[in-house]
Amino acid sequence: MSLKHQYETTFSNKPPFGDSMERSSVALQLLERIKSALIRGDLKPGDYLPSETELTQSLGIGKSSVREAIKMLQAIGIVEVKRGQGTIIRREPGTPLVDPMAFGMILARGMTRDVLEFRRMFEPAYTLQAMNGATAEDHQRIQQSIDAMEEAIRAGAQTSKHDIAFHRAILHSTHNPMTIRVGETLLQLIEAALETSMRSLPETALKDHKAIYAAFKAGDTAGIHAAIATSSESWETNLTYEDDSELIKAPR
């Protein structure tokens, strides 16, 4: 299929959006058209979108709205703008500048019961997935995160970044883009909780990390489940809100 036909099928044969439509809606509709074109095979990863002028004419909107729409699509990792070349559909989703789900949950006070329940379900799954495919380099990164956290505790330094580094090292050891994408959203929520809503107990976290990794190295499925369950219980026990000194326990 020619690029000209792709353009006509995907963008030109659609009704204009209208000048009064908000730019966020323009971006969502443009995203929907790109998604439909990808499903139909009219567009594929690596293809360039029509030029700004062509989009302006075919969509019936102003250039400023098109630019804003492209910026939003770039922010969520769908397209990449190449200076002097145009806007290309990414071959793999990029890391979004803003994760809408994580940001929304943070605004809603971070670690809700739903997120805690999701962690109990998802973390054992990706840890077992990683256990079966981790490389020597992956094991080295996991151990380095444990060593760095231990050193930070001895020095009385901040440990939250090392806490997250441990979970991220295991997550990325899955080498599965979908698992990593979902896991990164979870890690952003965990990071927010560490900074705002958790009573910091680094020694407990370090002990939990060592137990998880010991089971991980041994290929002990039951041990991984038990260690993560203990870690999750510690999280739930120590979850608080910034303006509330009373302990908040998530219902089970």
Image (tube, rainbow, N blue to C red):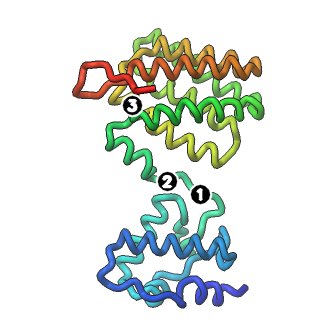
**If the image is split into quadrants, where does the N terminus sit?**
bottom right
CA–CA distance in space, label 3 to label 1: 26 Å
| Residue pointed to by mark 3 | 193
- Residue 84 seen in this snapshot: no
Give x and y (percent) for residue 71.
Answer: 43, 66
Secondary structure beneath label 2: loop
Alpha-carbon neighbours of circle 2 within 10 Å: few (<14), some, or many (≥20)? some
Q: Is residue 131 above or below residue 109?
A: above
Instruction: Look at label 2 and name its amino acid.
Output: Pro
Query: Who comes first in sequence, dot 3 or dot 1?
Result: 1
Secondary structure beneath label 1: loop
Q: Which mark is residue 96?
A: 2
CA–CA distance in space, label 2 to label 3: 20 Å
| Residue pointed to by mark 1 | 93
Residue pictured at 61% horizontal, 15% vertical: 210
Alpha-carbon neighbours of circle 3 within 10 Å: few (<14), some, or many (≥20)? many
Residue pictured at 70% horizontal, 87% vertical: 2
Instruction: Look at label 1 and name its amino acid.
Output: Pro
Look at the numbered discs 1 and 2 and tell me whether their residues touch, using CB distance below 8 Å: yes
